Image (cartoon, rainbow, N blue to C red):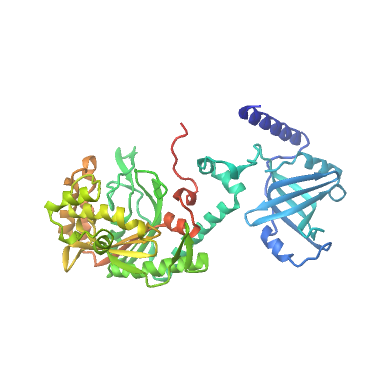
Amino acid sequence: MDQKKDVTEILSNKWEKIEELRRKNIDPFGYRFVKACRISDLIEKNKNIEIGQCNQEQISVAGRLMALRKHGKAIFGNLEDLSGKIQIYIKESEVGKEPFDLFGKIDVGDILGVTGLIFRTRTGEITILVKEFVLLCKSVRNLPEKWHGLKDIEIRYRKRYLDLIVNPGIREIFIKRSKTIQLIRDFLNNKGYLEVETPIMQPIPGGATARPFITHHNTLNKDFYLRIAPELYLKRLLVGGFEKVYELGRNFRNEGISTKHNPEFTMLELYEAYGDYYTMMQITEELLAYVVKKVLGSLEIEYQGNKINLTSPWRRISMYKAIEEATGVQIGNLEPPDYLKVIKEYNLSIDGEINKGEIANELFEKYVEPSLIQPTFVLDYPLELSPLSKQKKDNPELVERFELFISSMELANAFTELNDPAEQRRRFEEQATKKGAGERKGHFMDEDYIEALEYGMPPAGGLGIGIDRLVMLLTDSNSIKEVILFPQLKSKE
C-alpha cells in the first residue's frame, strides 16, 4: 500500500471512530478538565510508595496517550504532559464495562483526563489505577512511529508541533529559551533599566546596513519597512531623558538563511547614558554569566565538543592585534598601494569599495573568527565598518566598538555611541554614496534622528545581544533553526 493511500485509510478509520463516539453521545473534542497537579509532581510526591501499596488519595491528571498495551480485561498506557509521563492502568472491574469498552476507541495520540489512585506495580513502576477517564481530544492523525529515524531534518521544523510531541528534548530547548529571556529581564530591571517598545514598522530602516523587508500601509498610502534594528529609536529616548533603556524583540533582515542566520530573529538592545563601550563590556560579562549560571548551573559549559569557561575576566584583544597574530598583516600600517597585494595573497573577496576597513573585516572573518572559542571581546574596529560609533580619541581611524565571540559565534555587538549630529550626518551621507548602496541609499539619511541629536544626546554606551545564538550556546544546538519554534524555510517545491 502506498503511503498516500495508507494515510487516507487511517484518516477514514479515525473519522469512523469519531462518528461512532458521537452516536453514543460522547464528545470526541471535549471541554475543560481540572488537573489536580502535573505528572512530575505526582511522581515526586509518591516516590517513596512501596510495591503493592496504593495511595488512597484520589488524583486527576491530563495529557496525551503515548503508548497503549491491551491485556484482555486490563489495559496499560503511558500518559504524558509537559512535565513528564506516567503509566495508567485501566481495569474493567474498576471503571465498568461500558467505559472499558469505550477505551477500545481510544488511540495513541488522544488527549485524556484521568482520575484515580496511585500505586506501585510489581515491576516498581508508579502507576495510576484509573477510576474514571474522559476523552478530551481525539487525534485524527497517527503520530510518527519512527520520528527519530527521519533523515529530512526540515520536516521537524515544518511540523514543529509533532517534533514537540514526540521529542521531549526539543521541549527543553524552548523551556530554556523562555527562562533565558525572563532572566535577562530580571537582571536588567534590577539594574535600573526600563523596558520599552519601539516601532517595528519604520519609515526609514535605520540602525544597521541590512536589506529590509518592505510593507505598505494602505490608509497612509506609504511604504514602511520592518525594522532591521531598534537602535535609532532607543537613542531618541536617551535624548528625551531616559538614562537606561532596553528592548527585547524581533528584527527582520531580508538576507540569507544559514545555521546562524534567520530572516526574523530576536535581539536584546540596551543603552545607558553617560557610559561607553567599556560600560557595555562589563554589563555583557555580568549579564551572560548570570544567565548561564542560572540556566545551566555552572560557568563551565560544553558547546559542540568545545569546553568553554565563562568565568570572569574574559579575554580582550584589539581587532588589528588579533589579525596580526593570525596572519602577520599589520592593518594599521597598510597604505592604498598595499591593498590589492593583501587581497591577492590572502585570497579575499571584497564586494563594494576596497578600503582598509573592508580588508580588516575579511581577514578577521576568514582567519581570526574560527579560532575564537573562549569568550573574547574584540575591540576597536575600523571607522568604515561602524557608522554609528564614536571615534577613539587617540586614533580617529578606529571607533570604540567591540564584538563578543564565543565558540566562533558573534554573540554581542556594542559601541560608544556617536552623539555629534554633524558627524552623524556626514557618515550617513558617506554610506549613501558608497559603491553597492544601490536602491538602499535613501535608507541611510534619517533627518529626524539627526534633528533629535541636535537637541543633545548624552554620551552613551549601546549593546546588542543575539538571543537566538545565546540559546544555541545554552542548549548545545548547532543550528539557529533548533532554537526558533517556527524558523523560515525554503518552499517545499
Residue 216 quadrant: top left
The answer, for residue 435, to whether it is visible in the render is yes
Q: Residue at x 58, y 48 (%)?
A: 164
Which image quarter holds the N terminus?
Answer: top right
Nearest the eye: 202 or 464 = 464
Q: In this rendering, would 257 be left or right of 445?
A: right
Q: In this rendering, would 100 be left or right of 402?
A: right
251 to 312, vertically: above or below: above
88 to 488, vertically: above or below: below
The answer, for residue 188, to whether it is visible in the render is no
Nearest the eye: 176 or 474 = 474
392 to 33, vertically: above or below: below
Residue 432 x, y percent position in the rendering = 19, 47
Residue 326 x, y percent position in the rendering = 28, 60
Nearest the eye: 248 or 343 = 343
Please state the total of marks drawn on the protein image.
0
Q: Residue furthest right?
A: 93
Residue 483 x, y percent position in the rendering = 48, 52
Q: In this rendering, would 485 be left or right of 127?
A: left
Residue 223 quadrant: top left
Residue 114 x, y percent position in the rendering = 74, 51
Q: Residue at x 47, y 56 (%)?
A: 304
Residue 360 quadrant: bottom left
